[in-house]
């Protein structure tokens, strides 16, 4: 009994830090999202109000073209960015594994990851610029008139999403590269003797063996897609006409431009709930492993 | 089933010669063991037969077919790996069925073969388990099962028992033997453990430093080693070696050094050898005693260490400056520090050329 007590004493510092810096802000944000600007408890009516606002969901945008609103933008971001990142990361990891100088190429690709995202955003702005950028130049080969892609509502979001694939692919590539090293050589040899072609080996051995890595990559990418802020902030500030607006940026606008802290708290809570859903598979697999 | 034939097979890694001009014939249905210290080229040889390693020069035949350029999957072989190499994401059934599925074997046939193999190996209840839920011995059985269901012409084993604990290893050794008696498939087994080699192999190929030294049935290796390396490698504890000279006295040949003078047995009285320096080899189990005698087959030794093993005692002793091990009858008192006399079973002694290491007959 005494031992149990002294053991739990050691937990107190960590628990205290967690309570102050995690639990309290979360609970407080949640509480704030239930209050009206005047401080009255209105429960979910803030949510009902917010989800009908044009900057969050814009039903008319779906018929007319961008902007769709921050929430659909985040979803679209995920829908395009997630599969491309997983695909390119795996592809690069597999291809560069046996290439001479692959390590150097991988390091260069990984640079996108270590660059601060705010700089990534500035870079994207340059890359897509009509006069200075490389992408319009390349497109002009295919007879596409050069224009600043981030400045037009119909191309701005897609440009940023594809640009963010370039920034983020290094992450999944590095994870997959490490994952590939952990697959024992004998498995490939056993499969070879069993009669597997390279295609069989890739789909029946490599991909299933990388499943834990894929879980991590998918979860981390999902979370990144939900949190996306700095790239958009630096590249377009959500424009033109809200065409690249995302939830985190909108939260920032609510809190520090319009000073609507309750609305910001609502967006924060929605983001938190989405993030919890996204993180479930990883938490579950970590749980399984620890048991 | 098929014969496996290696003709002048050589493997080089850069400048390093891993296997040097190896000639080896493994008869149809035979269980051959490749044995040798680590780095001797035995595993490389096995991997070349499997097709996992390219041959630098020479030819390998499986059956009547030259397989030099045939990929592993078309060689009709199955291999059991040291660390089992089971697919961790598949259950036992699918691990065993994987190769058959890839070969488009009909489903019923796969089912039948997997069930049969599982029964043979006693893992029927484990068919739905994942490899990580199994013990080492069970994993090894699954690896065996994966090889069996393929019904290949040749089984290749790469140190399959070395990851098991001692007791299980002995049990699995017996099972492997039994399995071979049932299936009668040509088998090539690589190990560094000479006990495994002796017990499993119908013929054993002893390799060292990329070269094949001797390829014979186990008893032949033990009784008639072709050179000093094989003599020292086969047998546990290892054979004792003494530098000595051949001398002749009143028509009888002796082998002697500072510590002993032993008369050669009749069969060795006429040997063809043109030097007088020899290495005398005596197995620990060919020393008996202690005796109270000064016959010309007795040596005196000073006991340094006594290891009682129950069924025998091993003594480590000093014989005029040279180390000696003897396995003696346990029902006697021998104390450290004693000087005792041991009778050498001279009929079973071996003489080697100290320069070439070849056995002198």
Image: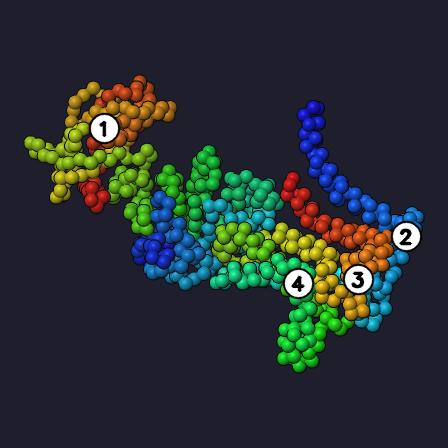
Residue at mark 4: A120
The residue mark sitting in front, 3 or 2, is 2
Q: Which-is-in-front pick, marks 2 and 1?
A: 2
Label 3 residue SS? helix
Residue B158 x %, y %: 43, 47
Point out the frontmost of discs 3 and 4. Answer: 4
User: Which secondary structure lies at badge 4?
Assistant: helix
Label 1 and label 3 in one chain = no
Furthest toward the bottom, the residue is A143
Q: Residue under label 1, please give it.
A: B319
Alpha-carbon span between mark 2 and mark 1: 101 Å
Can you tell which quarter of the image residue B309 is in? top left
Q: Kindly report the distance in space between the C-alpha atoms of the residues bearing marks 4 and 1.
A: 80 Å
Do discs 4 and 1 belong to a common subunit?
A: no
Q: What mark, if any, has residue A70 been given in the picture?
A: 3
Q: Chain of mark 4?
A: A
Real-space Cα separation, disc 3 to disc 2, in angstroms: 22 Å
User: Residue under mark 1: which chain is it in?
Assistant: B
Q: Give the residue displayed 40% in from the left and 59% down from the top.
A: B54
């Amino acid at each position: 009994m005494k031992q149990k007590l002294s053991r739990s004493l050691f937990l107190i510092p960590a628990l205290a830090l967690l309570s102050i810096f995690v639990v309290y802000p979360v609970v407080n944000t949640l509480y704030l999202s239930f209050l009206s600007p005047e401080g009255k408890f209105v429960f979910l009516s803030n949510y009902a109000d917010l989800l009908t606002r044009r900057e969050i969901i814009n039903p008319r945008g779906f018929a007319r073209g961008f902007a769709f609103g921050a929430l659909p933008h985040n979803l679209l971001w995920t829908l395009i960015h997630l599969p491309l990142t997983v695909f390119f990361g795996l592809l690069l990891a597999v291809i560069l594994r046996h290439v001479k100088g692959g390590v150097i190429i991988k390091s260069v690709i990984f640079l996108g990851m270590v660059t601060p995202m705010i700089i990534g955003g500035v870079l994207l702005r340059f890359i897509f610029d009509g006069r200075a950028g490389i992408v319009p130049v390349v497109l002009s080969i295919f007879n596409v008139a050069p224009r600043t892609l981030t400045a037009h509502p119909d191309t701005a979001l897609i440009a940023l999403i594809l640009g963010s694939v370039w920034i983020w692919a290094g992450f999944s590539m590095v994870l997959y590269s490490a994952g590939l090293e952990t697959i024992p050589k004998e498995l490939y040899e056993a499969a070879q003797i069993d009669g597997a072609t390279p295609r069989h080996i890739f789909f029946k051995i490599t991909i299933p063996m990388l499943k834990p890595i894929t879980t991590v990559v998918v979860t981390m990418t999902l979370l990144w897609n939900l949190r996306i802020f700095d790239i958009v902030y630096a590249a377009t500030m959500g424009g033109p006409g809200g065409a690249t607006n995302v939830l985190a940026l909108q939260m920032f606008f609510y809190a520090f431009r319009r000073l609507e802290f309750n609305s910001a708290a609502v967006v924060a809570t929605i983001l938190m709930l989405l993030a919890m859903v996204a993180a479930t598979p990883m938490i579950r697999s970590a749980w399984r492993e620890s048991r | 089933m098929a014969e496996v034939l290696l003709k002048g097979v050589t493997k080089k890694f850069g400048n390093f010669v891993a296997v040097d001009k190896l000639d080896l014939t493994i008869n149809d249905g035979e269980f051959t063991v490749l044995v040798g210290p680590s780095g001797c080229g035995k595993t490389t040889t096995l991997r070349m037969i499997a097709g996992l390693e390219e041959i630098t020069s020479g030819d390998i035949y499986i059956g009547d077919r030259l397989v030099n350029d045939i990929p592993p999957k078309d060689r009709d072989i199955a291999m059991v790996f040291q660390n089992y190499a089971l697919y961790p994401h598949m259950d036992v059934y699918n691990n065993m069925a994987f190769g058959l599925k890839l070969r488009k074997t009909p489903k019923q046939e796969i089912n039948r073969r997997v069930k049969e193999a599982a029964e043979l190996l006693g893992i029927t209840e484990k068919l739905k388990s994942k490899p990580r839920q199994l013990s080492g011995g069970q994993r090894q059985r699954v690896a065996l099962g994966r090889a069996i269901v393929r019904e290949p012409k040749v089984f290749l084993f790469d140190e399959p028992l070395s990851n098991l604990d001692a007791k299980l290893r002995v049990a699995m050794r017996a099972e492997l033997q039994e399995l071979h008696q049932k299936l009668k498939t040509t088998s090539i087994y690589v190990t560094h453990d000479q006990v495994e080699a002796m017990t499993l192999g119908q013929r054993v190929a002893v390799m060292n430093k990329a070269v094949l030294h001797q390829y014979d049935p186990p008893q032949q290796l033990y009784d008639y080693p072709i050179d000093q390396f094989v003599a020292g490698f086969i047998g546990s504890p290892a054979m004792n070696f003494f530098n000595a000279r051949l001398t002749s006295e009143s028509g009888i040949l002796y082998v002697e050094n500072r510590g002993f003078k032993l008369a050669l047995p009749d069969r060795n009285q006429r040997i063809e050898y043109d030097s007088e320096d020899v290495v005398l080899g005596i197995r620990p189990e060919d020393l008996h005693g202690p005796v109270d005698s000064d016959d010309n087959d007795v040596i005196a030794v000073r006991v340094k260490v006594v290891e009682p093993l129950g069924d025998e005692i091993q003594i480590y002793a000093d014989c005029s400056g040279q180390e000696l091990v003897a396995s003696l009858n346990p029902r006697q008192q021998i104390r450290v520090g004693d000087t005792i006399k041991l009778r050498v079973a001279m009929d079973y002694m071996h003489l080697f050329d100290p320069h070439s290491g070849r056995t002198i007959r």
